[in-house]
Image (cartoon, rainbow, N blue to C red):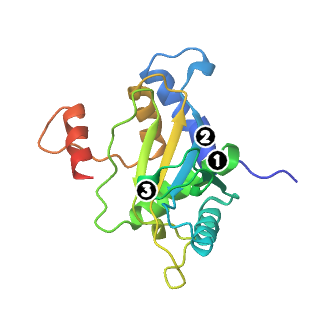
Amino acid sequence: MSKSMPVLKKFYQEEVIPELKKKFSIENIHDVPKLVKIVINTGVGAKNEKQYLEDVQRDMGLITGQKPVVTKARVSVSNFKIREGMPVGVRVTLRGASMWEFLFRMINISLPNIRDFRGVPGKLDGSGNYNLGISDHTIFPEISVDSKHISMGMDVTIVTTGDTDEKGRELLRLLGMPFRKPQGGPTQDQGEQQGDQAA
């Protein structure tokens, strides 16, 4: 028996695609902006403690539902006490159903868990991709605060086929990304700059 389609992917196909085609006057379905992958990264610094690394891998696996990959230093940096080959981070790359399910949980469950949450900055990277920094991984329901042994932040990179920031932002907005609304009537770009400074 095949697994059912992720809720957010179904919403994208039925609701978001028509809206994007209309807004950007897109005729070819293959030109409609879509998600490619989501990459979640976290650093482990120069602690080089086996237990800490194992805890980070465990929590990252719980959050993403996928086994993380340990990233290692390519060169030695004496000022930071980093040696070549030393573990410096943990990364997970999500595609397909896992990608859609993670984004759905993050938008609808995790981000609203942030205290005094007022939305996320709306600035993209210039190529239609979005980077979001999360300072506390316990906003994800998979992590039990009572039993947590570590505190870590993470960077979430959402890669899209949108060839402009406008297309990438509209894709994410339609999917439910709670972008921060500009206050006081500035332009969108001015509002984003102010939002980034406050983040």
In terms of secondary structure, where does tag 3 sit?
A: helix
Amino acid residing under circle 3 = Phe
Contact? badges 3 and 2 (CB < 8 Å): no
- The kind of secondary structure element at disc 1 is strand
- Classify residue 77 as left or right of residue 187: right
Residue at 45%, 29% in the rendered image: 128
Query: Label 2 is placed on what type of residue?
Result: Lys
68 lies above or below 95: below
Q: Do the residues labelled 2 and 1 touch (CB within 8 Å)?
A: yes
The structure residue drawn at horizontal position 33% and vertical position 41%, both measured from the top left corner, is 122
Nearest to viewer (mark 3 / mark 2): 3
Q: Is residue 170 above or below residue 9?
A: above
- SS assignment at label 2: strand
Vertical arrangement, residue 42 with respect to residue 16, above or below: below
Cα distance between the residues tagged 3 and 2: 31 Å
- Amino acid under disc 1: Leu
Q: In the orientation shown, which residue stands out farthest toward the right?
A: 1
Q: What residue is shown with label 3? A: 80
Q: In this view, does 118 lie to the left or right of 77?
A: left
Measuring from the top left, give residue 134's x and y in whole percent: 42, 57
Which sits in the foreground, 124 or 10?
124
Out of 136 and 98, give the one closest to the viewer: 136
Q: Residue 94 carries which label?
A: 1
Question: Residue 102: x percent and y percent?
Answer: 59, 54
Q: Which of marks 2 and 1 is nearer the N terminus?
A: 2
Report the residue marked by disc 2.
37
